[in-house]
Image (tube, coloured by chain):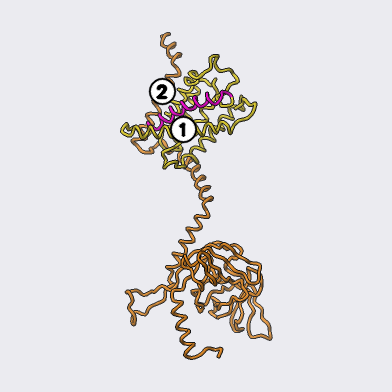
């Protein structure tokens, strides 16, 4: 007996190694048979939380890439929206057996340069005609009106934003459906003006202003801004309205470009009408 | 003494997190090279650590790694083997008069040649045990051997760099 204890004492390291090794190997072969079985459950919450923190961190570091993907996704989805299609009357036409024909298509672009503090500001975008951008495309950001493309090179394009002295487009008061003229006279990159709105229209602070759809560049009902101030001069027939722009020009980073697939057709038709019957100017 | 123990615990905890959260996510040569840098913490344990304590430490560190990687027992088994062999390799490499109380298993204390031999042998044993146990098929013997050799070299490079990163002049509290 004494000898046995002496032997154990002499070999205690090897015996400990052997015992623990047997435990470890049993675990290995058990987990080979029962994949990630019961033993893991006890600790999986703690481990899972550590991994979750790591995923959060790595996701945070890739936010730029994720944003790119999201804006691409947005433009694809926006292309499918119903109000980009115009109705085809099935009684008289039967084109490809569909009720809807696409009118607007969306492209994404990143803002590479953006001025705010001048009287005539421009936005430079990172896509040009090699990516299918042409001038006269509308520019929106998060669905809100930004401007339209005025100049295109191979890889870049320049847009004229609302924040430009000569930018003008017709807008509609969303509540009353009345038309006004959007201009930028304030010099403040957050505030623009709506003019030519007759006084019989009901306007209140907080009303939403949307695009009218009369412009060749923008589909109807894109948000433009929200009324912040209504000036009523007694000796004039129209309101002077200030709106807070829906597009955040100070933070502009991803924009979408709207391609009007029927712009040529519309322009030709309008030109023909003008040639035949003359314009207002004559 | 207490400071030294805390130092070791913190180092091992950091290395386990580094292994699980960073190194395991890197795919070097499509995963052919998988260094196990956490053995650094085990190799740094002082010479005079009792052998039974070394075994228990190795087993525990291995189990923690197993919880993270999801294959129970694998790292525990390999680390147990590593900590069993560690004193034997130290004895094999010991200078004629043995290790004195101020010496630590570091490049700074024992020199680069000694450290490369010490870490190289043990890392190769650990990686070999681990990866062969994981595969457990002799049909892919040479593939696994290449895996073991490449991963061991990567680990060894990391450990040697690590030795120089923690270098503190005139410090024996490592």
Q: Quadrant of residue B32?
A: top left
Looking at the picture, does residue A202 appear above or below residue B14? below
Left or right: where B31 falls relative to B99: left
- In x, y percent, where is residue A102? 41, 72
**Residue at 51% in and 90% down:** A278
Residue A67 x, y percent position in the rendering: 51, 57
Badge 2: how crowded within 10 Å, few (<14), some, or many (20+)? few
- Residue at the image position 56 percent from the left and 27 percent from the top: B107
Seen as rendered, the residue at the extreme left is B139
Distance Cα–Cα, label 2 vs label 1: 31 Å
Q: Which residues are magenta?
A: B109-132
Residue B153, disc: 1
Chain B drawn in what color? yellow
Q: Is residue A169 above or below residue B64?
A: below
Magenta stretch prevailing secondary structure: helix
Q: Is residue B112 magenta?
A: yes
Residues at marks 2 and 1, common chain? no
Identify the element where label 1 is drawn.
helix
Chain of the residue where label 2 is placed in the rendered structure: A
* Chain letter tied to orange: A
Residue A19's tag is 2
């Amino acid at each position: 007996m004494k000898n046995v204890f002496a032997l154990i004492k002499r070999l205690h390291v090897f015996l400990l190694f052997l015992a623990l090794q047997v435990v470890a190997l049993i675990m290995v072969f058990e987990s080979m048979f029962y994949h990630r079985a019961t033993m893991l459950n006890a600790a999986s919450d703690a481990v899972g939380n550590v991994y979750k923190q790591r995923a959060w961190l790595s996701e945070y570091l890739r936010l730029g890439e994720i944003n790119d993907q999201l804006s691409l996704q947005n433009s694809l989805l926006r292309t499918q929206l119903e109000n980009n299609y115009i109705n085809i009357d099935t009684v008289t036409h039967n084109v490809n057996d569909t009720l809807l024909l696409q009118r607007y298509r969306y492209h994404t672009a990143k803002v590479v340069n953006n001025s705010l503090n001048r009287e005539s500001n421009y936005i430079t975008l990172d896509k040009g005609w090699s990516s299918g951008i042409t001038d006269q495309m509308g520019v929106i950001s998060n669905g809100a009106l930004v401007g339209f493309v005025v100049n295109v090179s191979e890889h870049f394009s320049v847009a004229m934003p609302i924040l430009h002295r000569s930018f003008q487009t017709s807008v509609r008061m969303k509540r009353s459906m009345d038309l006004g003229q959007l201009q930028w006279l304030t010099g403040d990159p957050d505030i623009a003006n709506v003019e030519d709105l007759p006084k019989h229209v009901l306007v209140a602070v907080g009303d939403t202003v949307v695009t009218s759809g009369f412009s060749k560049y923008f589909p109807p009902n894109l948000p433009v801004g929200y009324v912040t101030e209504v000036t009523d001069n007694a000796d004039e027939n129209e309101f002077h309205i200030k709106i807070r722009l829906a597009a955040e020009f100070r933070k502009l980073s991803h924009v979408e470009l709207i391609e009007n697939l029927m712009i040529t057709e519309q322009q030709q038709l309008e030109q023909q009408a003008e040639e035949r019957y003359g314009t207002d100017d004559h | 003494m207490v400071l030294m123990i805390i130092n070791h615990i913190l180092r091992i905890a950091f290395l386990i997190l580094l292994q699980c959260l960073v190194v395991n996510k890197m795919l070097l040569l499509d995963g052919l090279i998988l260094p196990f840098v956490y053995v650094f913490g085990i190799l740094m344990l002082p010479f005079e650590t009792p052998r039974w304590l070394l075994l228990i430490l190795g087993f525990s560190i291995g189990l923690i790694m197993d919880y993270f990687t999801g294959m129970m027992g694998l790292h525990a088994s390999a680390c147990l083997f590593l900590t069993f062999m560690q004193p034997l390799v130290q004895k094999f490499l010991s200078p004629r008069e043995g290790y004195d109380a101020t010496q630590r298993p570091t490049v700074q204390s024992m020199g680069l040649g000694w450290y490369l031999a010490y870490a190289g042998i043990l890392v190769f044993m650990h990686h070999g045990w681990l990866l062969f146990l994981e595969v457990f098929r002799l049909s892919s013997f040479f593939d696994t051997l290449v895996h073991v050799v490449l991963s061991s070299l990567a680990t060894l490079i990391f450990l040697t760099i690590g030795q120089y990163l923690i270098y503190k002049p005139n410090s024996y509290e490592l």
